[in-house]
Image: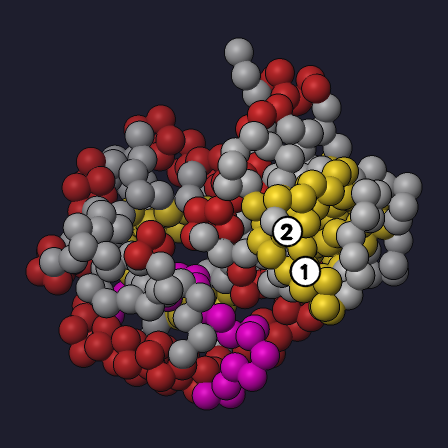
């Protein structure tokens, strides 16, 4: 482990497998199918493992659809807020299901997707999200069709509907109430469909989540409306399965001790900066030593957070940030030209493989 230069993301296949085994049980009990949301996690070096447990992938762009087709296999669902003609033509060669965000786009590209398994995203007008930024039902939302009559007008041209209305929803009662509302408003349209996707953002792998009741909810909805249900887990499939491993390069003092590590919140854990949250620290463990941990970029707010740790940090010490799989590697960037973390995988047999390192040529190759 000490021979791997920091920083690096360390993906643990046993951690992944724990979540995937939960998904297998949910699939068997509910009859629902589960497709991985590539927008959250696209590290294809572990797709051989994940493909044993999941039904396929869902994408948000042409590149993601192609990645799902080439690296994961199985079903490929393609959705995008908007397509160009060039993109939809490419997607039509990779996808098993193509989901449109609007009726206007559906009509615009009918010629391209003729004969394919087509779906439409519907915005039910209610959602569950801790953040307005991620709320699909926020005011003036452009995500999905809001007008029920507009959906009904193209029901004979589509075979499925997507209702993506959750973000980190761990409240089964809220989910049940929303599904009941969807059924009551769109019931007659659902009867004409073959499948319905409930999107992602349902935190069914959270410890203590009522999984049996969740399965029954999914099964009842599917049987009531005669549809195959799909879920699109992102975080739920990979939570707790990776760390960002860093090294302390300097300690400065400004009223408090500030440990500066060889990584960056801005460049390597960007969602925490966007949502103003702090990543957990897995190593060192919790204790009485108070310290702020900051990133190495020039951004004043490049701060991971303030922590009470078991040991006092010194230059050369290792710091591991927990839960670093979702929305990290897909969002990492070259801000300040800061070296990009390598990606390593701890395989099921315990061996560790560096699957990707990044060089100066990668940096210059991303520019012009």
The residue pinned by badge 1 equals 290
Tag 2 secondary structure: strand
Is the residue 87 above or below the residue 276 in the image? above
What is the distance, in whole Å, between disc 2 and disc 1 at their CAs? Answer: 8 Å
The numbered mark at residue 256 is 2
Q: Nearer the viewer, residue 301 or 175?
A: 301
Tell me residue 52's x, y (percent): 67, 62
Majority secondary structure in the magenta region = loop
Examine the image and state in which quarter residue 190 appears.
bottom left
- Look at 35% across and 77% down and name the residue there: 175
Q: Does the rendering let one see residue 360?
A: yes
Query: Which mark is first along the chain, 1 or 2?
Result: 2
- Look at 35% across and 43% down and name the residue there: 80
Tell me residue 348's x, y (percent): 82, 61
Q: How is the image coloured?
A: secondary structure
- Look at 35% across and 64% down and name the residue there: 129
Pointers 2 and 1 in contact (C-beta within 8 Å) = yes
Q: Nearer the viewer, residue 180 or 344?
A: 344
Is the residue 276 above or below the residue 128 in the image? above
């Amino acid at each position: 482990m000490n021979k791997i230069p920091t920083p690096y993301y360390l993906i643990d296949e046993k951690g992944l497998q724990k979540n995937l085994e939960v998904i297998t049980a949910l699939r068997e009990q509910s009859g629902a199918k589960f497709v991985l949301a590539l927008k959250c996690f696209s590290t294809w070096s572990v797709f051989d493992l994940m493909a044993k447990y999941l039904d396929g992938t869902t994408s948000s762009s042409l590149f993601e659809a192609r990645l799902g087709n080439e690296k994961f296999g199985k079903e490929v669902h393609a959705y995008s807020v908007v397509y160009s003609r060039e993109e939809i033509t490419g997607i039509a060669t990779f996808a098993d299901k193509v989901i449109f965000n609007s009726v206007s786009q559906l009509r615009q590209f009918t010629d391209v997707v003729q004969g394919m398994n087509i779906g439409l995203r519907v915005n039910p007008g209610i959602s569950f999200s801790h953040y307005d930024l991620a709320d699909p039902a926020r005011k003036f939302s452009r995500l999905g069709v809001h007008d029920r009559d507009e959906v009904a007008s193209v029901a004979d041209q589509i075979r499925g509907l997507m209702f993506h209305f959750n973000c980190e929803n761990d409240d089964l009662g809220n989910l049940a109430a929303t599904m009941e509302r969807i059924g009551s408003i769109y019931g007659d349209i659902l009867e004409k469909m073959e499948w319905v996707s409930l999107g992602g953002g349902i935190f069914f792998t959270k410890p203590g989540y009522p999984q049996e009741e969740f399965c029954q909810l999914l099964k009842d909805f599917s049987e009531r409306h005669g549809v195959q249900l799909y879920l699109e887990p992102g975080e739920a499939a990979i939570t707790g399965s990776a760390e960002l491993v860093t090294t302390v390069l300097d300690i400065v003092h400004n009223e408090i001790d500030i440990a500066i590590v060889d990584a960056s919140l801005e460049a390597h854990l960007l969602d925490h900066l966007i949502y103003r949250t702090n990543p957990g620290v897995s190593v060192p463990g919790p204790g009485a030593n108070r310290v702020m941990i900051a990133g190495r970029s020039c951004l004043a707010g490049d701060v991971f957070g303030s922590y009470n740790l078991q040991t006092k940090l010194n230059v050369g010490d290792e710091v591991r940030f927990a839960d670093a799989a979702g929305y990290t590697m897909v969002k990492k960037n070259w801000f300040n030209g800061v070296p990009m973390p390598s990606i390593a995988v701890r395989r099921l047999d315990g061996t560790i493989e560096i699957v990707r390192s990044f060089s100066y040529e990668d940096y210059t190759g991303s520019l012009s």
